[in-house]
Image (cartoon, grey):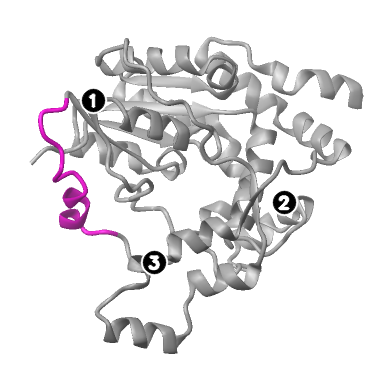
Amino acid sequence: MRIPDFFIVGAPKCGTTAMNDYLRQHPEIFLPKRKEINFFGSDLVFYKPRVTKEEYLSYFAGAKDEKRVGEAAVWYLYSKLAAAEIKAFSPDGSIIIMLRNPVDMMYSMHAQRLYNDNEDLRDFEQALAAEEDRQQGRRIYKNASNAMGFFYRDAARYTQQVRRYFEVFGREKVHVIIFDDFKKDTPRSFRETCEFLGVNTQFHPELNVINPSKTVHSEALRSFLRYPPPSVRWFLRLLGLRPVEWGFKGWLKRLNTKVEPRPAINLALKQSLQAEFFPEVEQLSELLGRDLTHWCRMNVAKAA
């Protein structure tokens, strides 16, 4: 059986879903339909049972003679243990990391968690203010699928996360993509990723917009689809079906989705966060050998 030999490890809201979709189209690459299997990272806290090794390997049973086999899960980057666990599982594995302006990433991540019903604090500033309580296990939203997503600032502190993968795999086995580059010239970014993976760089995928900013029309319908009432579950079991097998569930979810840009982040909050993250971005710039301080510098100057 084939096992993964490359891993898209994060960060959240940095283009990993799009890259995963584009690479899945490549005839020399196998990626399972499911993203976020979350087998590695034994220190990560999910509120549903983790997959077993047998279940994990079953996702790659369809791989045949493709040159590369991979998977994607954004919390692998955040995890302190995932890098070593992946290395032990796939010693020659390759790593893809995607990074974005930390303030933009946190704001987008908050919107995604609201859409997925993983967050109950609708105001971004309030969600940031609740981080200390949530670190202590308080004010945790009962519907959330994981604990890490409540810690927006921790998820955006990339330097130590990236350094961990550099140390475990070596820099030559880690490909870092900056979201700005990916958005500005997606074909080039895709081509460079194919070169890193050693597959045909002349393949051109359909570059559709993946995972845009969105909300729901009805929170009640979202809740019903995510947590069907006991009577509905009983009826499905009677038919021998699980909720995920409802033929119309995906259709209803799409019908309930409203794609629209999120209002701009409050300027004062943005400037405050940029000032807060400036030292972190300086460290990341030094680690990557690329100046990324423009993510923070201009508005820090204005704030001063």
Cα–Cα span, label 3 and label 1: 33 Å
Between 215 and 68, the one nearer to me in the picture? 215
What residue did someone put label 1 on? 27
Question: Per the image, is 61 magenta?
Answer: yes
Cα–Cα span, label 3 and label 2: 25 Å
- The image shows residue 158 at horizontal and vertical percentages of 54, 31
The amino acid at mark 2 is Leu
The N terminus lies in which quarter of the figure?
A: top left
- Which disc, if any, is residue 236? none
| Residue 188 visible in the shown view | yes
- The image shows residue 98 at horizontal and vertical percentages of 48, 28
Residue at left 43%, top 89%?
231
The amino acid at mark 3 is Lys
Cα–Cα span, label 2 and label 1: 42 Å
Report the side of 298 relative to 139 (left or right): right
Magenta region:
51-66
What residue did someone put label 3 on? 48
Of labels 3 and 2, the one closer to you: 3
Q: Residue furthest left?
A: 1
What residue did someone put label 2 on? 128
